[in-house]
Amino acid sequence: ESAGAGEDEEVGWPQQAHCVSFLSLLTDALSAFRKHLTPFERTEIKQYKDVWYFGIDAEKVRETCALNHGYDDIEGHYKMVINDHIAYRYEVLEEIGQGSFGRVLKCRDHKTKQLVAMKVIANKKRVAVEAMAEVEILELLQKNEKHDVANVVHMKEHFHFRNHLCITFDLMGKNLFEVMNEREFRGLGTSQVRSHAISLVQSLQFLSRTGIIHCDLKPDNILVAEDDSEVIKVADFGASRLEHLNTYPVTQTLPYMCPEVILKNPFSKAIDMWSLGCILAELKTGEVLFDAWEKYELLLQMKKLLGAPPKVETKPSSRSPPSGMTQNSWPLGCCVLQLLYSRRMTRWRLSMALDTEDQLFLDFIQRCLTYKPAKRMTPDEAMQHPWIKERFQSPSSSADSSPHQSTNWEHMVDSTCNAAPSTSRAGPRPIGARGRRREGPLNNAGPTFMGT
């Protein structure tokens, strides 16, 4: 490593060495760095053709035990050691995420001189099988998206190291939940919400064409670029399904779970559109739209906001039809009037919940949150929706026509969102934890006048 240090110190890559070829220099390398390697590594390194990094300054794991030679904790997670190597190429810098699947590490790739995010899967058979399914999804995404315009995070490489599957990605910034947390859960402005909506719809268009259902779309799985807060990408395809393999169980986070998944009915890619509606509503207000702890409570909240789900059959009315109506047309006429009233009541309740009078935005959300999956808006229909097209057609927003325009988060807040932050969402929370918003029941009395 020290052989190449003089040249590489100028560009800030410590301990960088020109690749040590396995065939020509391995013996010399082992001799020079033997004291910095553990007994396990002195044998392990012989499996590697190229060596880029040793981690000589790291406090290496030297204990030996039954848990994967001491490299795993009792839950099967890899023990992270700062400045140590992974696969004699990556330098561990910090942990940036964790979950039941394993850990996410920020690493320096000493071969490409780039920073990457590395997902280190737990050393458990079930988790490893699920992770390999994710790799297949990621390979399919990589194969079908060559120009990086679909706003999804792509896999760079995957390999096994010390019985752990490792997957590397381009390093992004915070996720949308963390961004909202930093803003004390104040809602974003309309331009910012619409910009993110365009990016997410583009992602869902690509996934739809590729035959992939994300299944767990939520702010935590949407990453923001570090150098441009307008650029977002969909991440974490660990719960994703191929459209023709849409079988249960399916993992969908409760506040973004659609009715068909709650009821375990057949599901399709329409479940991602439901999640999209919930996400955009949350970005607009800073509050989770359906903040429930269990499925029954979630269904009650849906009914309170969106009205009762449609029935499969409508019983004929026993009342006499008005003059001019036949007995056959009376039930249909009643159903049409009831449907129109129901839609207007839903629109009014959404307007109150989202604190906006923007009818195009409300219509967009309402069409995402349609009970029947077959009638729910598709990604292609969403891209043609007037609320989306309004951005590109407005003369005053010509500079706002690019979905990836760089803007300042703080200057995109609506004047209606400048109120004091909610105390129920004030403190930092772990990723995936959701606060509870407890409000009184919605007033069932509708507006005194509802025009067309």
Image (cartoon, helix red, strand yellow):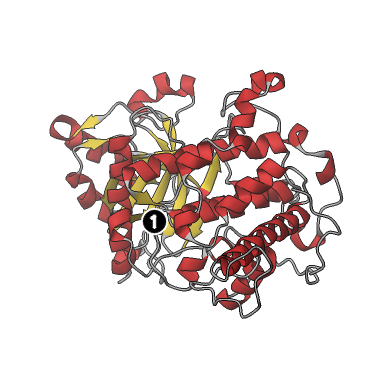
Callout 1: SS? loop
Which is more toward the observer, 129 or 368?
368
> Which of the 4 image quarters holds residue 400?
top right
Q: Residue at the location (69% across, 19% down)? A: 395
**Relative to 119, is 206 above or below?**
above
Query: 118 or 411, which is in the foreground?
Result: 411
Tell me: residue 434, above or below residue 32: below
Q: Residue furthest bottom?
A: 318
Q: Nearer the viewer, residue 47 or 180?
A: 180
Query: Where does the image place residue 289, in percent across and percent down from the top left?
Result: 67, 59
Residue sticking out furthest to the front: 324
Residue 75 at least partly seen: yes
Residue type of the residue flagged with mark 1: Gly
Residue 431 point in image, percent of width and height: 58, 58
The residue labelled by disc 1 is 238
Residue drawn at point x = 46 percent, y = 39 percent: 380
Image side of residue 389 versus residue 450, left or right: left
Q: Residue 105: x, y in percent?
A: 46, 48
Image quadrant in which the N terminus is located: top left
Residue 17 left/right relative to 360: left
Up/down of 303 relative to 243, above or below: below
Nearest the viewer among 249 and 116 is 249
> What residue is shown at x 59% (from left), y 72% (from top)?
299
Residue at (81% x, 71% y) in the render: 440
Q: How many marks?
A: 1
Q: Quadrant of residue 346?
A: bottom right
